Amino acid sequence: MSGAGHAAAAADPAALDALLDAARRFVRDEVIPHEAALLGGSWEAALPVLEALRARARALGLWAPFLPPSLGGLGLPLDAYARLSEVLGSTPFGLYACNCQAPDVGNMELLHQFGTPAQQAQWLAPLAAGRVRSCFAMTEPGQAGSNPVWLTTRAVRDGDAYVITGHKWFTSSADGAAFAIVMAVTDPDAPPHRRASQIVVPLDAPGYALVRNIPVMGEAGGGWNSHAEVRFDAVRVPVANRLGEEGAGFALAQERLGPGRIHHCMRWIGVAERALALMCARVASRELAPGDPLASRQAVQFWIAESRIAIHAARLMVLDAAGKIARHGQQAAREEVAYIKVFVANMLQQVLDRAVQAHGALGVTDDTPLAWWYRHERAARIYDGADEVHKAVIARRELKPYLRA
Ligand SMILES: Cc1cc2nc3c(=O)[nH]c(=O)nc-3n(C[C@H](O)[C@H](O)[C@H](O)COP(=O)(O)OP(=O)(O)OC[C@H]3O[C@@H](n4cnc5c(N)ncnc54)[C@H](O)[C@@H]3O)c2cc1C
């Protein structure tokens, strides 16, 4: 079916089911067969395969599902897009194949919602077309990322330019990206939440340097599949590169976070579903003795049942939060978004851990994608708000009526 055909999925449940079926077939028949090679090789070796998969995703009408048709996407609302994210998340490169991978998806949403027409023409159009990649540089090695208003990167106004100086890390996918959206302090004397702005910085600008791709659990990765330490040393960019008004950096970051957490959570549910499927297939075929499969043991059956229950609960919670955002905006769904960020990240790690355990030694090899996810998704409980930060927010709200002012 064409992209235009799948665009009906925005409004029509039957068309959404057809889209999800098309995505399932694409993942099963076209992406998963390349999985081992993509995970086992360098980014450069993976690129031609990924470009071919992207061409297929376009032809199948699966391209940039969250973007409006005017930008080549399907215009899916958040709750429908969430369901597609689960399907595409069941293989490490599924979202990339359809040009809806983090951090580009968040940057595209920001540029679409808050970019000027000139910014959209310069930055959003090539991202939407998949011609370039981007990254988001907020966290700094010297400051606690859990306190998002504590930043030292400065953007100092000089005529019609900003001069940006600072040190960032865990700038995911900076390697090979065309530009970064950089969170920098534009007014250190403003109230904390009005101090910073988001500024688009082309990464060929003089003064920018990628220091290294940071090894994560032993793997530095490359290209989109990496997390960089970067420096900005008096990087000069036009004031016209600022998104929104000066000092609106945090407000824009908040806009990005709600939908971003839905995307991550649904992707994690896709990972968990795949881990459960791999676990079931393995314990059904692995025999402890002739005719005595691992699946006959109650301990293993409990892993399977508990994983299924947790995945089901997680999906209902995330779709509930996504529906609330779609109906009432993300401010109204702040609590639900905090619940899912904690619940789904922990569910994912438990399910992955059980799947690794059920595979025995095979589970810690790279012969299945489980170990790759086990390494890379440990961070799920840290990024986009660590567990403890979300729990503190939830507990504060619960306690509010009981505590004296
Ligand atoms: C794989 C990965 C990708 C990332 N991608 C990006 C990116 O693209 N762009 C970007 O800007 N950043 C990115 N980050 C950074 C991420 O946003 C930060 O790691 C996160 O905000 C936590 O900040 P921190 O690492 O400085 O931990 P800290 O703030 O130093 O916190 C350390 C730990 O302290 C605990 N803690 C924190 N606050 C509290 C509290 N109030 N009460 C109790 N305990 C608490 C938590 O357990 C937390 O894990 C990424 C991180 C990872 C791991």
Image (cartoon, rainbow, N blue to C red):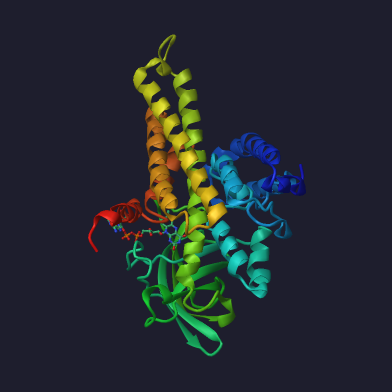
Residue found at the very far left of the displayed protein: 404
Name the residue nearer the viewer: 170 or 255.
Answer: 255
Image quarter of residue 344: top left
Residue found at the very far top of the displayed protein: 291
Q: Residue at x 43, y 38 (%)?
A: 371
Position above or below: 106 against 206: above
Q: Residue at x 42, y 18 (%)?
A: 295
**Relative to residue 102, is residue 371 drawn left or right?**
left
Residue found at the very far bottom of the displayed protein: 159
Image quarter of residue 397: bottom left
Point out residue 368 in the picture as x, y percentages from the top left corner: 48, 34
Q: Residue at x 45, y 39 (%)?
A: 314
Name the residue nearer the viewer: 174 or 8.
Answer: 8
Point out residue 347 in the picture as x, y percentages from the top left corner: 40, 39
Residue 222 visible? The answer is no
Name the residue nearer the viewer: 114 or 121.
Answer: 114
Position above or below: 328 against 94: below
**Ligand 1 image position (quadrant):** bottom left
Number of on-image labels = 0
Point out residue 302 in the picture as x, y percentages from the top left corner: 37, 24
Quadrant into which the N terminus falls: top right
**Relative to residue 69, is residue 153 drawn left or right?**
left
Residue 148 visible? The answer is yes
Quadrant into which the C terminus falls: bottom left
Point out residue 388 in the picture as x, y percentages from the top left corner: 31, 53
Position above or below: 370 against 49: above
Q: Residue at x 50, y 24 (%)?
A: 281
